[in-house]
Amino acid sequence: MSGFLRPALLTIGLMIAGLAPRAAFAVTTDDLYQSRTIVTGQGEENRQIGFRDCLDRVLVRVSGDQRLPKKPEMLALRDKAGDFIDSFRYHDRLEGIPIHDEQGTHDRPHDLICLYKPATVNKLLAQLGSRPWLGERPTLTVFLTAEQGAQYFMLSAEEKRGETMRESFANAADPLLMHVAFPKAAQLAELGKKGLSTDDMARLDLLAKQTGGAQALSGSIVWSDKELGWIADWRLADHGKTYRWQIRGVSFDEAFRVAIGGAAQILSGNGQP
């Protein structure tokens, strides 16, 4: 999406997170070993497609490693994705909305929710050279500058132009059981544009803790007419090392998914995004 704004409502979870962020959240086994995807109807063909997508998602959710779906071994595992599921259920995304005259139930979008036994997923991760990322998942305080032509702003908890960006960040964090917080405008004003672009991540990490986060995720997005999308650069410090990664020519939703996914990969001990 090229504009800063698009019509949307903030989710209840985001509103709560914005009011009372916590530095880290405990992860339960039931929460961790499940995944969901959107399918059309409840037919067998789309269910099998959903099973394959859910397998990719649960392996990344449990491990934090964004590289797993690209491994060649996944081709064979996806062919029997349904065999790894303990149980599954559907949720009609249009629940309460009458079926259109030309629409049958098979056309309606559903959430397909797949539940897995930890031993099954952990065994698959071991086969892929990975392991579970257990314990608490951190809240990341996001320090972001956004620029599109003559428009520029620093994303704060109050910035009206950033409502959909804050929502998008929360949506990106949810599949990985992570959370985000945002600094107040006054804190950003004191920091300034130069402070956001500095390599001193220790200063941003300190400010992140003052906003209720565990550490800082710093970045910038710049709209590129040439690439028909945003160019996003991200930074995060962990154990004394500052990691950097980038994505180009994407929507800001995808830019934020890459930001959170990269942070998860680093914090789970899986290295450079």
Image (tube, rainbow, N blue to C red):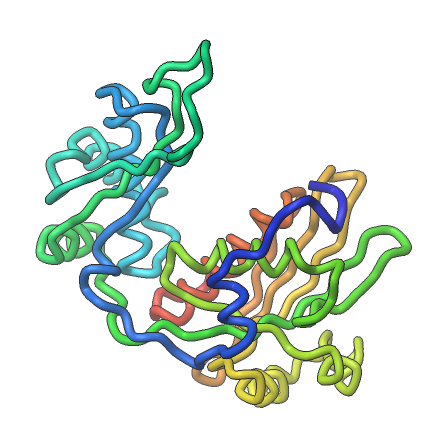
Observer-nearest of 152 and 42: 42
- Residue 259 in view (yes/no): yes
Q: Is residue 68 above or below residue 107?
A: below
Where, quadrant-wise, is the N terminus in this rendering? top right
Q: Residue at x 34, y 44 (%)?
A: 69
Q: Is residue 31 above or below residue 95?
A: below
Tally of numbered discs? 0
Q: Does 16 sit left or right of 43 as displayed?
A: right
Q: Residue at x 34, y 70 (%)?
A: 269
- Residue 241 in view (yes/no): no
Which quadrant of the view contains residue 80?
top left
Residue 241 x/y as whole percent: 50, 79
Which quadrant of the view contains residue 85?
top left
Observer-nearest of 71 and 161: 161
Q: Which residue is most to the right? A: 150
Q: Does 156 sit left or right of 57 as displayed?
A: right
Q: Residue at x 30, y 43 (%)?
A: 56
Residue 248 x/y as whole percent: 65, 47
Which quadrant of the view contains residue 163?
bottom right
Q: Is residue 14 above or below residue 77?
A: below
Q: Residue at x 75, y 83 (%)?
A: 186
Residue 242 x/y as whole percent: 54, 76
Q: Does 68 sit left or right of 86 as displayed?
A: right
Q: Which residue is most to the top? A: 102
Residue 136 x/y as whole percent: 31, 75
